[in-house]
Amino acid sequence: TLISLGEVTMRGSAGIQIDVKSGAIVDLNLQLPKDINILNVTGPSIRNHKNIIENDTQNINIEFTQEMQGQFRIDVNYEVILGENKSELQVPSLQVQGSEVQHGRIAVEALTAVEIQTAESKQLSTLAINELPQQLVLKTTNPILLAFKYVNTESPHSLKLSMTRHKELDV
């Protein structure tokens, strides 16, 4: 997942590698917090996807045109509109419902003059930038400021960032 922080938005670009160990699936359910705007969902053989908001979560139900087996990839792009004075940001974590194990990488970049620090992290380990997958690094031309990895079996990971906005000065 690449998290891009701008002046008024936090955008996320998540690539999900699904590995069906046995059998086949005809639909897939992803879960995000409810205040997230889903921009697009792409992948092989997707018939459609529906967003269903329940309580504090948003479920993305993806239906396929055929039974899916083996490995395939789903890409989800989303954004959150930030308040002007918001300084603590909860990074949305995309969860695959019904999965036995979830593991991945999170990279954070700044698109504008902001200072980013980790305020709180659960079930995450820091990662050196050069340990990120090449496909994640190639998604951006901006420098990656923070990187994390996670392996979840039961409780999901969470990341809260502290953001300080700076004024741009003429040079």
Image (cartoon, rainbow, N blue to C red):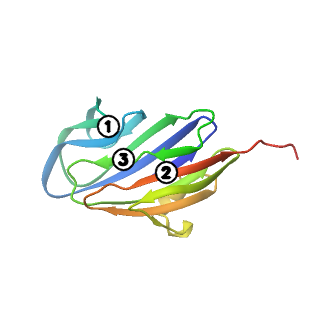
Q: Residue at x 63, y 36 (%)?
A: 85
Q: Residue at x 52, y 61 (%)?
A: 147
Residue at the spot of label 3: 94
Where does label 2 land, which residue?
160
Circle 2 Cα neighbour tier, 10 Å, few/some/many (<14 / 14–19 / ≥20): some
Q: Residue at x 54, y 53 (%)?
A: 108
Residue ID at (23%, 43%) = 28
Q: CA distance from mark 1 to mark 3?
A: 11 Å
Q: Nearer the viewer, residue 79 or 167?
A: 167
- Residue holding disc 1: 57
Q: Position of residue 18 (x, y in %)?
A: 28, 54
Instruction: State whether residue 86 is above or below residue 161.
Output: above
Disc 3: CA contacts within 10 A as few (<14), some (14-19) or many (>=20): some
Residue type, numbered disc 3: Leu
Q: Is residue 138 visible?
A: no
Q: Looking at the picture, which amino acid does disc 2 mark?
A: Lys
SS for callout 3: loop
Q: Secondary structure at mark 2?
A: strand
Marks 1/2 in contact by CB < 8 Å: the verdict is no
Q: Nearer the viewer, residue 128 or 167?
A: 167
Task: From the viewer's perspective, tell me whether residue 113 is left or right of residue 74.
Answer: right
Secondary structure beneath label 1: strand
Q: Nearer the viewer, mark 1 or mark 3?
A: 1
Say which of marks 3 and 2 sits in front.
2
